[in-house]
Amino acid sequence: MDPALSPKPRFGATPDEWHVPLSAGQVTLAEAVADLRLVGGGQAEVPLLVQLVENPKFRIPGFDLFHGRVGLDDHDCIHVLLGRGIRPKDEAFVIGFTMGSTHRVGSSEERLFSFIAGNLYSGIYRFSNEDIAVFRDALRLGYISRCQALDQVDFRPYMNRSLAEARAALGIEADLLRAYYAIEGRRYPSSPESVRLTA
């Protein structure tokens, strides 16, 4: 296909820029996820360790090391519904909020995940100390949210609904997210993914 004819992302041309703000509630989940896939990487680009820790297809039957594991398609839906891009603090927030929404993550699990993400993950997947702080904030925010456990949601019935409708149906409180995002933006003023959250 001629590159000039290929679709252009609507919400940012590069992974660093891409972001569907909470204010874009009229966009459908399908439209937003399709836009994300124009700039985001696929499962093949994710290192094996990250997949072992975060992807449910690597779950050992009867044993859950980490709660809130989701496949890439569901992970993309959660990014969009939470109004997050695909930079490091965005990833940390999405993972933390998803884990927190299960109401099953204890302090040992939180510490172990933080250690793995901050020390054993490689390259762009490794969490900085700030990323770990965002992960921990998101874990608690997901826990106090009244949303459904996001790792248990079948997102397919929501794909043709607007983001605002899908959030309402799943119990994702946009006001709760906005309040935290304002704090995150003030806390990390040199972080583009944190500052743009209030747009």
Image (cartoon, grey):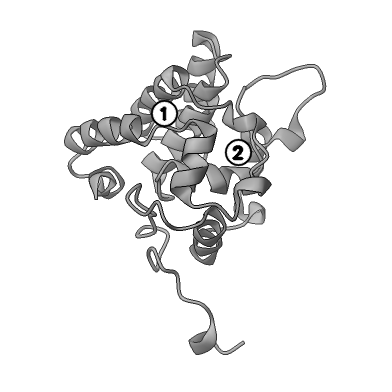
Percent from the top left, x then y, of residue 148?
Answer: 56, 27
Q: The residue under label 1 is which amino acid type? A: Phe
Q: Residue at x 50, y 22 (%)?
A: 100
Callout 1: SS: helix
Camera-nearest residue between 125 and 153: 153
- Is residue 39 found left or right of 66 in the rendered image? left
Counting from the top left corner in percent of width and height, residue 34 is at 56, 62
Residue 124: in sight, yes or no? no
- Coordinates of residue 159 in the picture (x, y in percent): 60, 52
- Residue 125 is labelled as none
Q: Secondary structure at mark 2?
A: helix
Q: Quadrant of residue 189?
A: top left
Residue 65 percent coordinates (x, y): 66, 19
Residue situated in front as seen by the camera: 168 or 8: 168
Of residue 131 and residue 179, the one placed in the foreground of this image is: 179
Would you place residue 158 above or below residue 104 in this image?
below
Report the number of discs.
2
Disc 2 designates what residue?
A: 50
Q: Nearer the viewer, mark 2 or mark 1?
A: 1
The residue that disc 1 covers is 135
Mark positioned earlier in the residue sequence (2 or 1): 2
Which residue occupies the extreme right position in the image? 61
From the image, which quarter does the N terminus lie in?
A: bottom right
The three-letter code of the residue at mark 2 reads Val
Residue 84 image-quadrant placement: top left
Query: In the displayed structure, would residue 35 be above or below residue 198?
Result: below
Label 2 CA crowd tier, 10 Å (few <14, some 14–19, many 20+):
some
Q: Can residue 162 be seen at all in this image of the molecule?
A: yes
Q: Residue at x 52, y 66 (%)?
A: 38
